[in-house]
Amino acid sequence: MIEINNLNKRFASAHVFENYSKLLQSKRVCLQAANGKGKTTLLMMLAGLEKPQSGQVLYNNEALKSPQNDVSIASDRIALPDFLTARQVIELSCKALKKDMPEQLITGFNFTEHLNTRFSALSSGNQKKCQLITAFLKQAPFLLLDEPSAALDQTSIQFLLTLLDGYLNDKPNGQVIITSHEPEVFIQHGFECTAL
Amino acid sequence: MIESLASYVSFLSYRYLAYTTTLKSMLSQLKSFSLLFALVLGPAFLGMVLLLFLGLGKIVDSHAEPAYGAKIAVVYLLLESVMLWAMASAIKNSQNRTFQRSLYKSFWRVSADCKLLLLSNAWLIASLLIAIDLSLKQWLQVPHFMLFMLLQWLCGVFVLYRPRTLFYSLLLSSVLVLLPVSLSPLQYYLGFVAIFGCSILLPPVRISHKLKVHSLALFWLSYFIQHSWNLIWRAAILVACLFALLQLIAVRNDFSDLLQAVAFSVCVLLTSSLQFDCLAVFQKYRLFFQSNNQDKPFYRSQFLPSFIFFAVALILVISMLGTKMIYFFIGAVWCVLQQYLAQKKPAQFALVWFFITIGIVLLA
């Protein structure tokens, strides 16, 4: 469960969040809002990668000093090293997180043949797959996915849904939060839609 | 026919406009270094132009010391390549290359490239000025100068179309001038032309794709393999400076201390300015490493490339000029200070460097 209290975030003079409070109780949440309303910014703040001007976020009633230890995120706002190959990006993440190469994720997303392609040369769909692989690799209790199905082919969306179905099996206090403009497929898999 | 000519002229106008626009944009990006340029390059501009012609004179008249003339030629080609490399995107209008392909004949593109290349190549223009001034009798005495101009032109062409070939060419040419053999100027330059020709045939080597990026050190290594330009231009300027200072020390040994201080100052400037590039990389990929709980190690690692460059540059300075240990310690502390400024107070970077340089030169 994630509880957001009196969050304030502004970029220059634009207030994205002003005394924003929200309780995300469901295990699987799909956040919805129009473009530019701050979905990605909220996910980044929940992941501890962007700081709000003020406000508090509680994770299972606890304020975390370093949320990034307990939160895994996939978002286009996080620039992956685009001069490395996809394999090198994944290897770097594996080393940092002390994990083995996620062969199952790579095979499941049909990503094997793209491993030796430089990240900048990957198609947007394959870049998304690489983001998802590094996010799932961490196996953190809280998983945040920003537009996870955007640009993915149908087979990969099905594999993503399978992963999401089983993600919380070994994480009783975990939560999956996604943003999507096409939530129907996620609703069918137990996601509860909520407006931002 | 007239219609085609009119189209070609309008294409050339477009390319010239794109060229000047890109150059203006590049210059505006250098605004933060404007103080540095004004302080360092301003007073030295006339000297640098004279040095350019002096060096060309040595290349033309290198019968007494062919190896020395050949070394100067390689340094010239290296510096020329660095300058053209910086201007390559403006010359080619790289951003709109596909647009050009979709509308214009390939011959037109190449023709416009060549015209702008010649316009941008101040080094070749300087050589042409000297060439025009030579009489037929003098030409017959220095046929190697014609080959040198050919090499200058080839450097530009390789920068635009075959950068990898240029790397091989300059590397192998450097090896040739360092070989302990006695050759005539013509033989040296024929050797360079052969090297430039053969380098076209050498296959590309892709090291970075084969690296296992298991650590932050390897991350930076991969980055600089793919963005080698950031290191190459610094190395080229350092080598050229050291080469020039070495010649000055040979002529005026009584200025040795002062010139060593200048060498260290250049070394610190080139090293610490690398921090600007590393900071940009750090800011771009910070979130990725932070999401992998690597934010602090990644922050620390951004200083690694500058320190390694500084160590290598120091070894080069010491091996070429020999130096007092006091400069070593001053240089190390100074480099750390400049890195701090590059990181935290970039506006003061140039000013501090300039005043410390003046201080050290006065002490020397």
Image: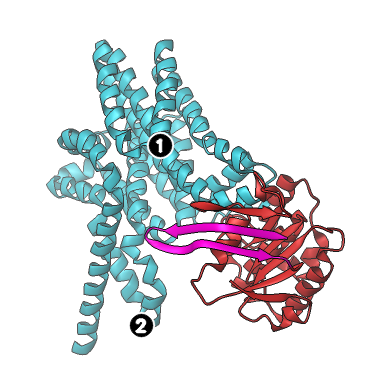
Chain colours: A red, B cyan
Principal secondary structure, stretch drawn in magenta: strand
Above or below B211: residue B106? below
Taking the spot 30% from the left edge, 70% from the top edge, the residue there is B111
Taking the spot 72% from the left edge, 62% from the top edge, the residue there is A133
- In the rendered image, residue A13 lying in the magenta stretch gets the answer yes
Which chain hosts label 1?
B
Q: Seen in the image, is A5 located left or right of residue B324? A: right
Whether residue A79 can be seen here: no
Which chain hosts label 2?
B
Taking the spot 38% from the left edge, 68% from the top edge, the residue there is B95
Region rendered in magenta: A1-25
Answer few, some or many: residues within 10 Å of disc 2's Cα (few below 14, many 20 plus, some between 14 and 19). few
Q: Give the residue pinned by disc 1.
A: B344
Q: Nearer the viewer, residue B121 or B307?
A: B307
- The amino acid type found where label 2 is placed reads Leu
- In the rendered image, residue A39 lying in the magenta stretch gets the answer no
Q: Position of residue B338 (x, y in %)?
A: 39, 30
Taking the spot 29% from the left edge, 17% from the top edge, the residue there is B360
- The amino acid type found where label 1 is placed reads Lys
Alpha carbon of mark 1 to alpha carbon of mark 2: how far? 47 Å
Q: Nearer the viewer, residue B247 or B27?
A: B27
Q: Nearer the viewer, residue A6 or B74?
A: A6
**Which quadrant holds residue B265?**
top left
Q: Give the residue pinned by disc 2.
A: B103
Q: Seen in the image, is A68 located left or right of residue B4? A: right
Answer few, some or many: residues within 10 Å of disc 1's Cα (few below 14, many 20 plus, some between 14 and 19). few
